[in-house]
Amino acid sequence: MAGGSYAERQTVLADLRDRLARIEAGPARKGSTLSLGPGLDGWLPKGGLVCGAVHEVMPQERTLPAAAMGFSILALARLDAAAGPILWLARAGRGRLYARGLVGLGFNPGRLILVTPSSAQDLLWAAEEALRCRGIGAVVMEVASLGLTPARRLALAAEAGGTLGLLLRETAGASSCCSRWCIGTAPGDKAGDWAPRLVVALDRCAGGPPKAPAEMQWQGPAEGFVALPRPVESLDRLARVI
């Protein structure tokens, strides 16, 4: 470089600046939203889950958290691998995710980093730090309850890092999240039907109206969720199938 012309030196410097910018930005993310599939993207103002924000996912019945966890896993199966690994912050004393089951749903468990903090305070600290990290594709946080102040801190951290955050809560509470989903399970049409079916409701959404419960079927990571034609009369009839 020392012996090159002025124009050559400027070209090398521009290339170095471009490389540094890419390093600081972290892995490229596929757009600013995560598509959930044709059944749900139309519910959201930007056509998918906004990255750089935190979204709540709750079970329709507090005693059946598997529905909310299943929805989160299926959604993240559509996250571009280039976005980075997925950090799952589990609550102590809860069941572990089953790797073979994840594979059956089209989710690559090799992308998952599972951490079980020893306390709720440690979990929130780890979540905030991870959301600010541009090398993380998504952060899933299991919490029993959450105050408005820590919820706002998580939202600000996600915005700073451009990271997708999924907050798994047992019940609704104070929140500054971008959207809130309520998930239940629906029975399949026939014996041996492996495709997961969920009853999905959008309780709140920044910039858009809520959506009433509707049955969705998972068609795999390539297609995502598609809507089923029959209406949902009541969430009370749901059976646990996942």
Image (spheres, rainbow, N blue to C red):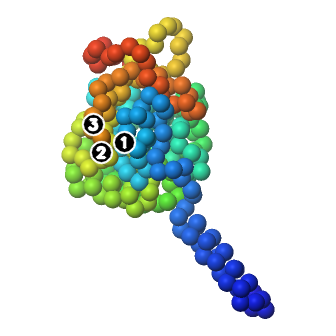
Q: At numbered mark 2, what does the secondary structure look like: helix, strand or loop?
A: loop
Find out whether the residues at labels 3 and 1 contact each other: C-beta distance under 8 Å: no
Residue at (54%, 11%) from the top-left corner?
192
Where residue 26 appears, as percent x and y from the top left, is 55, 61
Find out whether the residues at labels 2 and 1 contact each other: C-beta distance under 8 Å: yes
Residue at (53%, 68%) from the top-left corner?
24
Query: Of residues 83 and 118, which is closer to you in this image?
Result: 83
The kind of residue on which mark 3 rests is Pro
Q: Is residue 131 above or below residue 4?
A: above
- Mark 2 → mark 1, Cα distance in angstroms: 6 Å
| Mark carried by residue 207 | 2
Find out whether the residues at labels 3 and 2 contact each other: C-beta distance under 8 Å: no
Relative horizontal placement of residue 110, taking residue 174 as reference (left or right): right
Q: Which mark sits nearer the N-terminus, 2 or 1?
A: 1
The kind of residue on which mark 2 rests is Gly
**Pointer 3 residue:** 209
Within 10 Å of disc 2 (Cα), the crowding (few <14, some 14-19, many 20+) is: few
| Mark carried by residue 75 | none
- Image quarter (top left, top right, bottom left or bottom right) of the C terminus: top left
- Image quarter (top left, top right, bottom left or bottom right) of the N terminus: bottom right
Q: At numbered mark 1, what does the secondary structure look like: helix, strand or loop?
A: loop
The kind of residue on which mark 1 rests is Pro
Q: Which mark sits nearer the N-terminus, 3 or 1?
A: 1
**Pointer 1 residue:** 45
Where residue 172 appears, as percent x and y from the top left, is 23, 38
Q: At numbered mark 3, what does the secondary structure look like: helix, strand or loop?
A: loop
Residue at (23%, 56%) from the top-left corner?
149
- Mark 3 → mark 1, Cα distance in angstroms: 9 Å
Relative horizontal placement of residue 59, taking residue 11 as reference (left or right): left
Q: In this view, does 174 lie above or below 149?
A: above
